[in-house]
Structures are given as structure tokens and as C-alpha cells.
Image: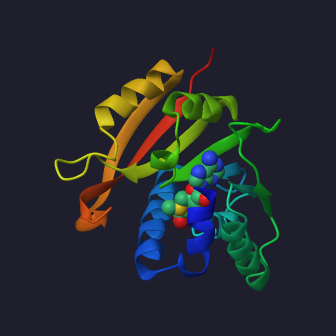
Amino acid sequence: MKHDFNHKAETFDSPKNIFLANLVCQAVEKQIDVLSDKEILDFGGGTGLLSLPLAEQTKSVTLVDISDKMLEQARLKAEQQDIKNIQFLEQNLLAKPLEQEFDLIVVCRVLHHMPDLDATLSLFHQHLIENGQLLLADFTKTEANHHGFDLAELEKQLIEHGFSSVHSQILYSAEDLFQGNYSELFLTVAQKSLA
Ligand SMILES: C[S@@+](CC[C@H](N)C(=O)[O-])C[C@H]1O[C@@H](n2cnc3c(N)ncnc32)[C@H](O)[C@@H]1O
């Protein structure tokens, strides 16, 4: 996986990837009333297509990724844009979690790459403050495409992992959207419940 994205890093910022990240970024902005005081974890943040615009509006962003080349692109852009409230971490949190908890976790088009959904949802729960919010964007499972997510199933799993106020919206749909097939880009928002 790491090597897949290392290979794609220099060309990752394609018009399609920029367009999809912008859609998600705008939806995140709509969901969160006050962004300015938030500490955000961008899990699998890649070349920073979400992290960089979010950093301009928030207290801080921690971009975690396992691909050093994707991170290198993100770092370069942050330098060019003089964005300083962003931290870059090359780390597999499943193997080595952080000690920090965040107000928000954004996960854009990463979940379908994760080998263990249960472990990943637990990881997100563990890295959120009480009442912190998880914002998951990915592709739906369709007749043509079995690699995406069934939203009802995903929402159920989030509730089983201790999240509440779980709701989803479709941000965009198109032919050829995901792995060459029709799919929908969704955003699911979930709040870490009080214990
Ligand atoms: C399709 S890209 C999405 C990048 C970014 N979130 C965006 O929307 O532009 C998927 C990213 O997930 C990262 N990734 C895959 N598995 C990961 C893991 N276990 N931990 C952190 N990042 C991971 C990849 O290296 C890659 O940068």
C-alpha cells in the first residue's frame, strides 16, 4: 500500500482528486460550526488536499500517512503556502497510536484501504476527545462496485464502536468514479459518545 502511493505521489494532485477533496472540504466546513479552535487529525492525509485548506481555518492539523512520498508533496506545498500550523507524521497508527486526542478526525478516501475496519474504527474512537467528531468520506458499494461501503452497515458499525449522532450524505456521484465504475462519494459524520 505504502509503495502504491509513493508511486502516485507526484501526480496525485490531478483535477479529479482536487475536485473530490474540495467537495469533502466544503462539506466538512458546513458540518462544523466553529473550526478555528479545533485540533484536527487528517488520517491518510496524503498530499494535503484537505489538510492545507483546513489548516488555514483551524488551530492545528496533524497529517498522518504511511507514504513518505505523499507526505513530501504535502510538506512542499505547506512550505510554498507558508502554512505553519500543520504537523506531518509518517506513522502507522494501527501499530503505533499517538498519545494525543483530537477534536476532529477527517478520513478522506482512506477507509477502503484499511485492512481491518473494526481495528480502524476503534483507532479513530481512541484518538478523539469526548464529543469529538469523526468525518469519513469514501465511496459507496454499488451493483457495479463491491469495494465501497454499504452506508447502513457502516453506520451500524460506528454505533457498535461507541459513536452516536451518526449521519451520512451523498456528496457526488458519477460513472467511472471509483475503480472504473459508477459510485457515490459519501460523507459520514459520527460523534464520540460520552462513556
Ligand atoms: C486515495 S489517497 C487519499 C489522500 C487524501 N486523504 C485525499 O483525499 O486527497 C489514500 C491515502 O491513504 C494513505 N494510507 C493508506 N493506508 C494508510 C494507513 N494505514 N495509515 C495512514 N495512511 C494510509 C495512503 O498512503 C494515501 O496517501
Q: How is the image coloured?
A: rainbow
User: Which sits in the foreground, 171 or 59?
Assistant: 171
In the rendered image, residue 50, in percent from the top left (x then y), is placed at: 58, 64
- Relative to 156, does residue 187 appear above or below in the rendering? below
Figure quarter occupied by ligand 1: bottom right
In the rendered image, residue 163, in percent from the top left (x then y), is placed at: 51, 26
Left or right: residue 190 compared with residue 127: left
Image quadrant in which the C terminus is located: top right
Left or right: residue 159 compared with residue 122: left
The residue drawn where x is 30% and y is 65% is 177
- Can residue 50 be seen at all in this image of the molecule? no
- Residue 153 in which image quadrant: top left
In the rendered image, residue 173, in percent from the top left (x then y), is placed at: 25, 61
The residue drawn where x is 43% and y is 25% is 157
- Relative to 1, does residue 117 appear above or below in the rendering? above
- Can residue 109 be seen at all in this image of the molecule? yes
Image quadrant in which the N terminus is located: bottom right
In the rendered image, residue 187, in percent from the top left (x then y), is placed at: 40, 49
The residue drawn where x is 45% and y is 72% is 17
The residue drawn where x is 47% and y is 80% is 14
User: Which sits in the foreground, 67 or 139?
Assistant: 67
Give the residue furthest to the bottom.
80
Number of numbered tags placed on the structure image: 0
